[in-house]
Amino acid sequence: MRIHIRNGRIVDPASGKDGPGDLFIADGKIAEEFARPDRVIDAKGLVVAPGFVDLAARLREPGFEYKATLESELDAAAAGGVTSLACPPDTDPPLDEPGLVDMLRRRASALSRARVHPLGALTLKLEGQALTEMGQLTDAGCVAFSQGNLSMPDHQVLWRALQYAATFGYRVWLRAEDAALAKGGVAHDGEMATRLGLPGIPSFAETIALGSLIELVRATGARVHVCRLSTAGAVELVRKAKAEKLPLTCDVGIHHLHLSDMDLGYFDSHCRLEPPLRSQRDRDALARALAEGVVDCVVSDHTPVDEDGKHLPFAEAEPGATGLELLLPLVLKWGEAQKLPLAATLARITTEPARILGVAAGRIALGAPADLAIFDPRAAFLVSAQALKSQGKNTPFLGYELAGRVRFTLLAGHVVYEA
């Protein structure tokens, strides 16, 4: 389909462009101006941006279809303007075999809602003992290797994994958390957890694990992406590692830019997350670090949970929250608080995650794939279960009024979502 998008405010973080203009799409790509389009989209008063790139979105297939399905979550991605996403390997069974990866990619491709980039399991069954066949998984379509939210129990196995990954140029994505120090914890180890009588996870569970990981990166030269930082101490460790030019990148979950452990209130299980919501000092340090570029990008950390998993006492509730459809408004809210230009704000969910993912996404240029999000940055909406397309309706932001609504999402030149 040949599409003409007219009268929009085109914002392309990759080139720094931010101004009025028209876009033309032909054969699924950004094209030169042409006459007689098949469709004209009037984007007056709307922002035309690259489709968003999310590095942490659990689609729950295979194995957890009772929590969400591939159809429901890719519909949520399209409604949120997300056109490229990485899905962690902690499915059931885990993504440790090429056949599973191939099946997931084929299913996602047939639905044509977003480009799905699977992360392969770093170890068999995510048990942290034996390495997977990374070469075969890469051939099947894996873009990197991860343990999901699980820690590596054996530093020697992690050392060998990073040596192997460095030899063949594979990327490794890991959460920094010491499993023994975090064992049994459900909230940040602070005043709020003490007052509520909840077992805590100390900040040093993250910084000790991150310090070890940085040493292994220094020793092996492996390209490592640290997933979902949550503490101010971890930010400073990353700052020093980047000053040393180590091949290290990192992200932060969108919830951790706006919420703290004070939002647990009276045991609000919507705020039961992994990693846990930290102190206000940590939250503010993460928000600043993202603005400064110490933290590279922001992720939705989309983890749909069924009602039975959340309607439990806080310590027993399943961690996770829906995030794909709230990524844009929450990033806009963060950017406004940091007084950043719109292009710089959007870079954290377009060009920067695309660079880490290693895919040709997150930019508007002649010949580039026509993956676009067209949104109204001022349109307000009330976050409610009924308004969410995701099968997981649980989010700490239920009842909040947020600004920023996607009006159109285009994938390879096709309109896959229209409000």
Image (cartoon, rainbow, N blue to C red):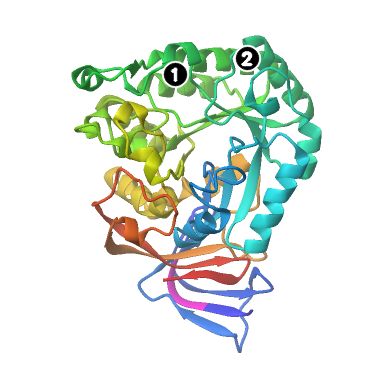
Up the image or down, 302 lies above or below 167; here it is below
Up-down relation of residue 163 to residue 21 (above or below): above
Give the mark nearest the N terminus, 2 or 1. Answer: 1
Q: Is residue 28 above or below residue 118?
A: below
Looking at the image, which residue sits at the far bottom? 36
Identity, as a three-letter code, of the amino acid under mark 1: Glu
Dot 1: element: helix
> Which circle marks residue 93 in the picture?
none
Marks 2, 1: nearer the viewer: 1
Is residue 82 something one can see in this rendering?
yes
Image coordinates of residue 302 in percent, x first then y, are 46, 44
Give residue 192's position: percent from left, percent from top.
22, 22
Q: Quadrant of the N terminus?
A: bottom right
The residue sitting at 41% across, 34% down in the picture is 318
Q: Position of residue 22 (x, y in %)?
A: 50, 75
Q: Is residue 362 visible?
A: no
Crowd band around label 2 with a 10 angstrom C-alpha radius: few (<14), some (14–19), many (20+): many
Snapshot quadrant of residue 123 = top right
Reading the image, the residue beneath label 2 is 216
Mark 2 belongs to which amino acid? Leu
Which residue carries the number 1 mark? 206
| Stretch of the chain drawn in magenta | 5-10
